[in-house]
Image (spheres, rainbow, N blue to C red):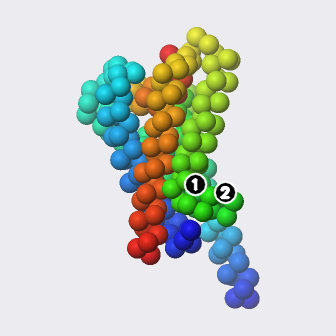
Amino acid sequence: MERIISRENGLMGTLSQALVIVGVAFAMVVIAYGMESVVPGVHDAFHDFRHTIGMPCH
Amino acid sequence: MHFQSIDWKKGIILGGVAGVLWGWVALAVNAMSGVFTFENSLLHNLIGFAIGGIIFGIVVSGFMRLLHEWLPFKNILLNAILLSSVLWLLLRIGGVMLSSVEPDRYHLITAQSVQGFVLAVIMGCILGFLWKIKSKEA
């Protein structure tokens, strides 16, 4: 039983880690492409950053 | 490689710290190179580059922790540079695709792309260096 709980904790830990990574990676994509439809204002807020790191912009 | 000695939370913090440093290095590099003329104020950019850097740093650091068993090099620094460059390349490929779909909205500029790739390598160096220091401490 302890082993099962330990496995579940391990699985939940790995899942939460993966979710954090996916969430932050999504934020990175939104910032990198300035997706206004996802987060209004993100285009202007990170405009200079986007150009500096070589991402496409208008 | 001592990847296991750096836990998940420390990895995120390291990624954040490396990201802030990298963001401000990127700001300085572009100010010196003049590849892009800044349109926002210095204060705005200090904050914006730091937040952007934190996000990028956490993603690279998170993938380093997640993929440590599959990374090809024994050296943490080289693995960090590889991951950071690959991540930047993936974003850039996405940018090429967006540009081909919406050419009026997305423009690709070669000088900025070259600078961006160099900055991605610098991110790998900063993060790899911090990981190395923390691994030795642990």
Kind of residue sitting beneath label 2: Pro
Q: CA distance from mark 1 to mark 2?
A: 7 Å
Q: Where does the N terminus of chain B fall, quadrant-wise?
A: bottom right
Counting from the top left corner in percent of width and height, residue B121 is at 50, 42
In the image, what residue occupies the spot 46% across and 64% down?
B132
Quarter of the figure with residue A10:
bottom right
Q: Which residue is mark 2?
A: B72
Quarter of the figure with residue A41:
top left
Q: Residues within 10 Å of mark 1 (few under 14, many from 20)?
A: many
Secondary element type, mark 1? helix
In the image, what residue occupies the spot 42% across and 67% down?
B134
Q: Earlier in the sequence, mark 1 or mark 2?
A: 2
Judged left or right of residue B63, residue A45 is left
Q: Where does the C terminus of chain B fall, quadrant-wise?
A: bottom left
In the image, what residue occupies the spot 69% across and 82% down?
A5
Determine the chain carrying the residue at label 1.
B
